[in-house]
Structures are given as structure tokens and as C-alpha cells.
Image (tube, grey):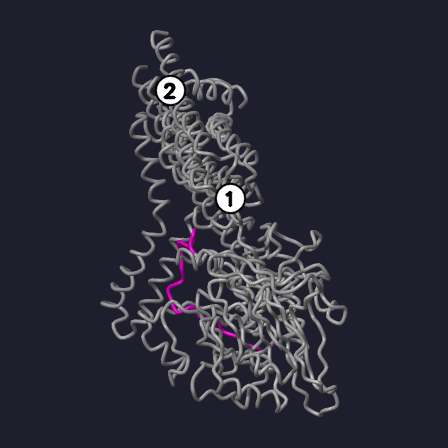
Amino acid sequence: MTAVFKREFLSYFRSPVGYVALALFSFLSGFQFINMISKGYISISSEIVSLSSFFIIIVPIITMGLLSEDKRRGTEILFYTTPVNLFDVVFGKFLAAFALFAIMFVNVIIHMIITLCCKGKVDAGVVGATLVFFFVAALYISIGLFASSITDSQIVSAIISFVILLVISLLTTISQFAQSGVASFLGATFCKFDPAKAQSAGEKVAAALRWFNPLDKTQDFRYGIFSVFPLVFCLSFALVFIYLTFRKLDKKRWSQK
Amino acid sequence: MSKDIRSNDKKGMDAKDSRFGILKMYSLLSVIIIVAIVLVFNVFVDKILGDKLVFDFSSTGQNSISKISQEYIDSLPDDTHIRIIGLMERPVNINDTAMEYVVPLLDDYQNKSNGKITVEYLDPAKYPAIINQLDPEGVYDLQSGMFLVTANGKIQTIAQGDCFAFDQNYLQNYGAYVPVANTVESAFTNAIVNLSRGYSHKAYFVTGLQEPSHQQFSNVLSALGIESADLVASDDFTVPDDCELLIINGINVDISTQMSSAIQEYLNNGGKIFVAVNYNNQIPESFDNLNEALHVMNLNIEDYVIQENDPAYMLDQYGFQSNMAIFSDFSDLTSTNVVRSHYTRPVRQFDLPYSYIITTPVIMTSSSATAVKINENLEMTQYDNASLYTAGMYSTFDGTSNPPEAYVFGTTDLSSDEYIGSYGTNDANVMLLRGIIKKLLPTENAVVVPTKPLSNFSVDNQKVTATSVNVMTAVLMVIVPIALIAVGVIVFAKRKNL
């Protein structure tokens, strides 16, 4: 796994991808920071939470080539022919992308140092937002990794992961549409004489959809309110996507004819 | 021979297809099982352990109820049912809105009340009948966007404005509400206490005399189990029979002679009064009629402002902001033996010769303070020589069965919304106010939740200058990203032919 991690991590810096991702993140985080400091206040936790919303752009860039590039070049065959555990390959690639995120976070650490030098506040909310940053990043990277495993085109992989992450980010809005849609459908068909029941069903559907939104669950961390469940949620679903990626590769190993 | 080989190949292919089918099934099943396990596990953690595994490390516990509220809720009987209702859709995108301090805290009330408190959000637009159901007689003027606490058939409404203390200076100068402290817990716990226990006393604020708002003072009273109402200044002013405490707070216009007579009658009948006025050089009002009423208690508010000259007491270079020593009889009411005060009028004993009127100083200056008058052009004229001035006095009658009581202050730095909003309810001045009110209207087991200051993310303006912001913009948004892109381009150019 170490070898895969090392190879994949260094590959970010042997191609423009890593530099572009780092430059993009530096610019976006710098913009957030300057926007606040120019108004005379700095909330690092708000900055970190805002940066999480840019994951839908950064994660596809970072993960698009993780497995699809090997497929395109044909080097994927090495995973199946060398004595290396396939899970180690998947996890090594996941860790490499995650390590790149850790390097990106150096920008925020520099902002924290500037904040402290300017007698600003770096409190428990910053620790909470940092936790959220890495746990949500882990979940999103695993989704990007999975998207990369199902195609040999980096562009298609990036589009797939972008769409999935976009849907996750818009789950709250989607849930509102689903609520009114379900309520009006049931109100017009099965619950004609009981609109309250239709409304209640709509609310339940909306709540169920919202339950899958990791960003919704992690909002309180920025205030210093730590909750174990959102972290468990991000981590467990990240493992699910890593497992799905592993199964996707493993399927190819034994389906070779 | 070749037929045998073909037959063996076919058998091998069939075996491979069969193995492929089994592995495919295994793969599919394992994915389904893993996803199901993760879903069930997450639902379990969310529903069973979710609320228990939440830890509030915020500096002021903004989103958690305090020990004070928790202890009161625990003390309520098990069959208590208090409903907190938000007349709105449950707010979802609460970041950077006032609701970020309300919604999580209300959830905490529900989670930690063992079923005694429920929190509901009912949008009147969706449930038009809800307002009629809650308030059939339209007494409470319920409106969309409001919160209400209801128990035992009684309702207490809480507007969003009641949940915050605002920067009064900013409000007066720029007309905008800038919250400086979170009083959400204080407002809801007070409502819960008052509905479950009932108010013990009633106080009236005299209004209509160009005074600023008294919302924070009302909250302090409410926390002490005292219901408050407004008593508007008018020509037919009378003090209601149920008035246990009359409050004249921060008025900028003198009361009328008719009001003065009504207050004198109220005091002569054993009434209790709290008066706090300060010196405002824009409106250097003489409170002749108010003094006429206070003369019943042998007290008089002067028309001058105290200038402190003792450096140990001075809080600004002019001496108009200073510390005031608390007289020993009242020092146990607060945490320190001094209170802050600015633009303070002297309050003196009047010249009535009656020995049954007992007057006691409450707060006073050093012995080197002077009294001056400031005109509209900010020119000062000295009024009195250096001496000790009292800025707050207490008066009562000795030897009577129902003695009147009066606390009169030449400063509003105990009771103004500006002060309470800025310094919170746990400040020494506000503690003195609370102590005085408790002395006037004793209430058993008052539940007082401290104000929570909002997080302050401001930075040192001497370090964050326009120049330093420009430098940071150049470095963080231009130089670093461009340098990274340049390195990327160089790497790409060098490696493209490898």
C-alpha cells in the first residue's frame, strides 16, 4: 500500500494536476480570507466551511485520474498480475488524494497564523470545522475514486463525480422539491381526503433525503459543537465507496476471459 | 482428438461462466450487505446515540442549555408538558442568521428535558388554523415568525428581537441592529419558569418620556419572576392597583405635575419605586416634577454631572466615566465593591426634617469629585467644590406597617438596555440591579440564566491596515497561485516528452 500511495502521491507533482488543484485551492481560500479580513474580522471556521463547498470542483480534478488513467494506459493490468492486494491499491490511491488535501490545508494553517498575529480568534469552532473538512473530504474523495473506477476517460470520471457531489450538495433543495412533489402527488391520488397525511408523507420523504446530506449534519462543528454521528456517517460511507471501488476492480480480475 | 479438445474447452468455458456467475452473485450480495449494514448502523447511531454523543466545546455554550436551565427542568414534575412552538417552517439554512443561535438551542431543550418540553415548528401559511387554536381570543397577537411557549393553558410569546441584546450606540447612530449578546436561553428559560411557576410580582415601566427601550430590564425582571407592563405618561396618569414596583428608567423629559401627584400618592400608600436617570448634555433636563414626587422620600436628583478627579476612580481622562464605590449596606448584592458609571447626576438627601424617613447612600464617588454643568457647546462650569457625591440613594419610612421604598440613581448604567446589552446580566452593575429588585420584591428561587456574549471575530485594526490587506491579497491570491501554476507548467513541459 505504501508503494501505491507513494507512486500516486508523487504523480500529482509529476503532472500539472496537483499544482492546478493547489493553485485553485490557494486562490479560493485566499479569496475567502481576504474577503473577511478586509472587513475587519476573521472567522477561520467560516472560511473552512465555505471551502468545503468548493469540494465539488476540486475533488473531481484530484480523483479523475486515480484509476481511469491506469485503465486508459493499460497499466491497470499490473494490479491483477503483481502480488499486491487489490484493496491496498484502492486504499493507497485514496490516501494519496487525501494527502493532497492535507497539503492544501496548509493554506488555511497560514491563515490561522495570520489571524493569531492580528489578535483574532482561533477557537474550538476552528478545530470542529477542520474535522469536518477532512471527514467530508474523505467521503467525497471516495466518491471520486469510485467514479474513476467505472470509466477509462478522465473527463467522464470527473463529470460523474461532479454530478454525484452536486446532487449531494443540493440534497436540501432537492428534498424541498421532493416534499412538495410527494405531497401534491399523494394529495391528488391516494390521500385525496386527507391532505395532512399527504403533507406528512412529503415531510418524511424530505427528511429522509436530507438525512443523506453530510454538509447539513456538520454545520454545528464550526461553532464548537462536536457530534460523533456526522463523523461516523462520513467515515462509514467513505468506506462503502472504497469497498465499491474494490469490488469494481475485483470483478474485473475474475471476469477476465 | 480435436473434437475432444473442443469439448474440453467448452467444458472449461462453462465452468468459467458458472464461476463468474457465482462470483458476480457474491460480489453483488456483499455490496448489498455492506450497504445495508452501514445504513442500519448509521440509523442506529443517529437515533439511539446521536443526541448523547454531542459535545459543546463552544466558548460560551451557545447551543447548549446551561446547568441553571437543566436543573430547573429536572425539578419540574414528570407529567409537565411545555410546548415551544415556532410559527414558521423549521429553519434549515441557518448559517449566519439569527436562527443559528435559536434552533440548535431549542433542540437541546427538547433533548435534555426527558419529554417535558417539546419543540414544534408550525407554519401558519401551511396550517392556517393554528393561530386560532393556540389563541382563540386573539389576546397574544400571534404572528408568523414568532416563537411561543405554552403550558397550563397560558402562553408567553418570544419574538426574535427578544433573543438578542443589540449594540445600542450603533442603533442610535446608524439605525441598524447589531447583536452583541445571545439571550435566547434566558428568554426561553424565563418563559418556561414563569409559565410553570407563575409570576410572583408585577412591575410597571413609565413610558412616553423619550426614554430608550427597556427590553433588557424587562428580561431581568422576568428572570426574577416579575411580570412587567408599560404605563404610558398621560394627563390622566394613575398608578394601577396591582403595581408592586414603579420604574422610571432613563427618561429624558420630566414627568407632568399630575403624574408627580399620582406618584406621591402611590408612595404615601406604601408604594415602591425605582428611578434611574443620567446626565445628557444634549437634553440637560431638570426633573422638577419628578423631584417633587421624590421629596416624599426625602430624595432629590441634581441637575449637574459628576466629574471624578481621583485617578483611582477615573475611567476616562475627563472623569465623566468613573467607578463608584458601593456603600457597605449594599455591597453583598454584587460581586465587587465598585460599579461603573458615566455622565452621572448626584442624588442627594432633600431637606425634610422628618426623622422617620431613613435615607442611605447606595453608590458614591471618591471625596475629590466635583459637580459641573455642561452646556450645548460642551463648555463646563463648576457647580460645587470637591467632595463625596452620592449617585444612588435608598429611602424608606421607619416605624410604619407598609413603608414605601425608593431607589434613586443618577445613572442608567445599571438598568439601561445599552448597558445590560453590552455587559450582560452577569456584570457587577446588573447584579446590583438584580439585588436591589430582589430586595424590593423578594422572590424565592429565581432562575437567572446569564447572557451569552456572541463570538467576536474582530482583529486588531492597527495591524490589519489597508496596506497589509493589499500585501496579503497580492501574496495569497496572486503570487502563490501563479507560482504554483508556473511550477505545474514547467513540470508539464519537462515531462511531456518522457
Q: Is residue B87 left or right of residue B257?
A: left
Q: What residue type is labelled 2?
A: Ile
The majority secondary structure of the magenta stretch comes to loop
Dividing the picture into quarters, in which one does residue B135 lie? bottom left
**Above-or-below relation of B179 to B267:** above
Which class describes the residues within 10 Å of circle 1: few (<14), some (14-19), or many (20+)?
A: some
- Check residue B318 in the rendering and tell me which mark sits there, or answer none: none
What's the chain of the residue with tag 1? B
Asked if one can make out residue B19 in the rendered structure from this viewpoint, the answer is no
Amino acid type indicated by mark 1: Ser
In the displayed structure image, the side of residue B356 where residue A210 appears, left or right: left
Q: Mark 2 lies on which chain?
A: B
In percent of width and height, residue B143 lies at: 36, 72
The percent position of residue A30, horizontal first and vertical second, equals 42, 32
Instruction: Please give the range of residues in magenta.
Output: B78-97
Q: CB atoms at circles 1 and 2 under 8 Å apart? A: no
Asked if residue B208 lies in the magenta stretch, the reply is no
Q: Mark 1 points at which residue?
A: B458
Is B93 part of what is drawn in magenta?
yes
- Measuring from the top left, give residue B208's x and y in whole percent: 44, 76
Q: Along the polypeptide, which appears first: circle 1 or circle 2?
A: 1
Tag 2 secondary structure: helix
In front: label 1 or label 2: 1
Check disc 2 and report the residue beneath it. Answer: B485
Among the 4 quarters of the image, the one containing residue A121 = top right
* Neighbours of disc 2 within 10 Å: few (<14), some (14-19), many (20+): many
Q: Residue furthest left?
A: A188
Indicate the quadrant containing the N terminus of chain B: top left, top right, bottom left or bottom right: top left
